[in-house]
Amino acid sequence: MKNKDGETVYQIYNITVYWTEGADPNPEYKYSDWQKYSPGRIKNWTSFQQMYKEETTLEQVQQKARQWWINYIFTKVGYRDKVPLAEKNPELLELKVEFLEWETWCLSWFSHYTYNAHLSDEALLDSFSRFVHRKEFEDWIVSQGPNDPLYKQAKEEGKYLHCLMGAEDRWRWKGPCRCPDCVKFGITRIDH
């Protein structure tokens, strides 16, 4: 297994899915220009990161992402209209999987998780703090622009702007979580 600053790191992939679906017939709802696809249909999308405990190939992640999409169609219910996605006749436009990096923590919705669940709470908080500082520094470098030598190096190393979703504010941290669901999946999570 690979290490970063003495910690085990895991592969992180970004999965983005674009599709079309039947538009809400409610004339009061206005769709943004990017959503308009064709009469009676709109574009929609979702994106998330996934960390893998075992080394995984891009093809394996693509296969898992296709299975995720099939499950998503039948479990996703519209936020506003409460209609299941399956009833809106979704048509997949693109399913994009890209390897991001080897890292200790993976972004989830206003939280990060790791497989380093065997660490003590104090060690996990220290690990997460190092991760946040590392990402803040990488984000600063990437934000400097193409004329900065550090920027060019960061791009060559595949660095990207990392959304911390509030993790940069330590007072937001809740955890580490060791709830039954986290234990079941062999992870621990810090919400923020």
Image (spheres, rainbow, N blue to C red):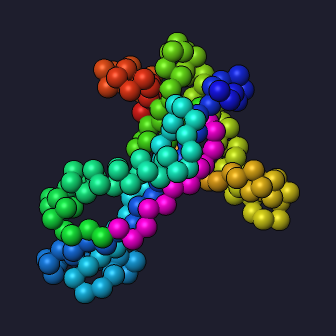
Res. 113 in view: yes
Say left or right for 53 vs 175: right
Q: Residue at the far right: name it.
A: 149
Residue 55: x and y in percent read 58, 35
Q: Is residue 7 left or right of residue 42?
A: right
Q: Is residue 175 visible?
A: no
User: Residue 152 or 51: which is nearer the viewer?
Assistant: 51
Q: Is 95 colored magenta in this rendering?
A: yes
Whether residue 72 appears in magenta in the rendering, the answer is no
In the rendered structure, the answer to whether residue 28 lies left or right of residue 110 reads left
Which residue corresponds to the image point at 62% horizontal and 36% vertical from the top-left? 103
Residue beneath the point at 29% across and 76% down: 42
Where residue 54 sits in the image (x, y, percent)?
Answer: 54, 32
Q: Residue at x 49, y 20 (%)?
A: 117
- What range of the chain is rendered magenta? 92-103
Residue 69 location, x and y as percent?
33, 55
Query: In percent of the image, x 68 and y 38: which residue is there?
Result: 134
Looking at the image, residue 181 lies above or below residue 70: above
